Image (tube, rainbow, N blue to C red):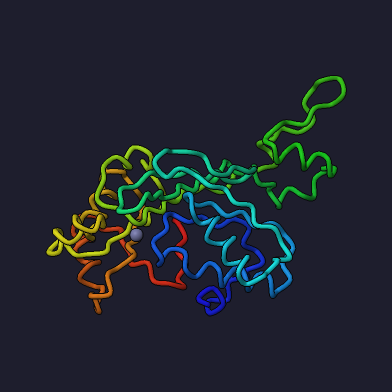
């Protein structure tokens, strides 16, 4: 429902990553899967989760006598181990083992290096279509006798930067994740409580806003996003202020908002 509200086209979703099986992290999923079916999706959907979610979904399909018109490909992973879940030409996604009441993993999304960009101001020069393909790979273009016809640097610009994003929810404070997320461009870290509720955070294996900021500081993240706030906080500004006192580049993860690295 929220995806619809923010006009996110669900047919473009190819992969879904579920961190753990507390209801607030997957109960909306069945509705989404059926919406995709009703909209005549045919493309495979990849679903990554700890053990159990595959059984839950298959049981729901079985008892509603439903046959989806697309295939769900289940990828069951062990949240206690770091592992690469998917990799293609542009992206790798790996798990970040977290500390929570249920087995739980965050996800590290890392863009691969992008191709060099053709300098459009040079397009008037005598370039053939096959030259553009070679130039994008960062290579020079040679004549048949082996001499250089076009130098790459004369026709291309550096690639746009590649970014990384770490999603860490739900988790107690753990420095174990710091090494893996070092220098990440954007860190989402849960901040269920404020520091005055540290006892509750320890008991429920969640984090405080201050602890989230501490992880951002230790890992050298460029930007921190706080989320997963306890319903007890009607105002979120105090959580933000607590984190900002330790890590200034912090924002609240408000649903529907987009954060672009700078
Ligand atoms: Zn949880």
Does the image show residue 158? no
Q: Nearer the viewer, residue 190 or 42?
A: 42
| Residue 189 vertical position relative to residue 37 in the rendered view, above or below | above
In the rendering, at what x and y percent does residue 227 appear? 34, 64
Where is residue 110 shown, x and y percent of the image? 50, 45
- Name the one closer to the observer, 124 or 176: 176
Residue 58 sits in quarter? bottom right
In this view, the residue in front, 91 or 95, is: 95
Quarter of the C terminus within the rendering: bottom left
In the image: residue 225, left or right of residue 130: left
Left or right of residue 65: residue 171: left
Q: How many marks?
A: 0
Q: Quadrant of ligand 1?
A: bottom left
Q: Residue at x 34, y 37 (%)?
A: 179
Camera-side residue of 112 and 9: 9
Q: Is residue 62 left or right of residue 25?
A: right
| Residue at the image point whose x is 82% and y is 42% from the top | 127
């Amino acid at each position: 429902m929220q995806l619809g509200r923010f006009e996110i086209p669900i047919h473009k979703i190819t992969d879904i990553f579920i961190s753990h099986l507390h209801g607030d992290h997957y109960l909306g999923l069945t509705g989404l899967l059926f919406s995709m079916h009703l909209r005549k999706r045919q493309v495979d959907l990849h679903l990554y989760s700890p053990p159990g979610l595959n059984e839950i979904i298959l049981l729901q399909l079985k008892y509603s006598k439903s046959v989806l018109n697309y295939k769900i490909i289940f990828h069951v992973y062990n949240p206690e181990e770091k592992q690469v879940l998917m990799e293609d030409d542009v992206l790798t996604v790996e798990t970040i083992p977290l500390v929570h009441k249920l087995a739980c993993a965050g996800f590290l999304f890392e863009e691969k290096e992008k191709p060099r960009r053709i300098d459009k101001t040079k397009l008037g020069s005598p370039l053939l279509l096959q030259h553009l393909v070679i130039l994008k790979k960062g290579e020079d273009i040679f004549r048949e006798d082996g001499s250089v016809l076009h130098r790459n640097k004369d026709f291309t610009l550096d690639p746009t930067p590649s970014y990384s994003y770490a999603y860490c929810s739900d988790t107690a404070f753990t420095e174990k994740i710091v090494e893996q997320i070092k220098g990440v461009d954007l860190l989402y870290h849960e901040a269920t409580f404020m520091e005055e509720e540290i006892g509750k955070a320890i008991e429920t294996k969640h984090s405080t806003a201050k602890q989230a900021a501490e992880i951002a500081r230790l890992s050298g993240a460029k930007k921190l996003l706080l989320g997963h706030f306890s319903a007890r906080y009607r105002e979120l500004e105090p959580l933000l202020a607590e984190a900002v006192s330790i890590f200034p580049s912090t924002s609240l993860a408000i649903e529907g908002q987009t954060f672009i690295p700078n």
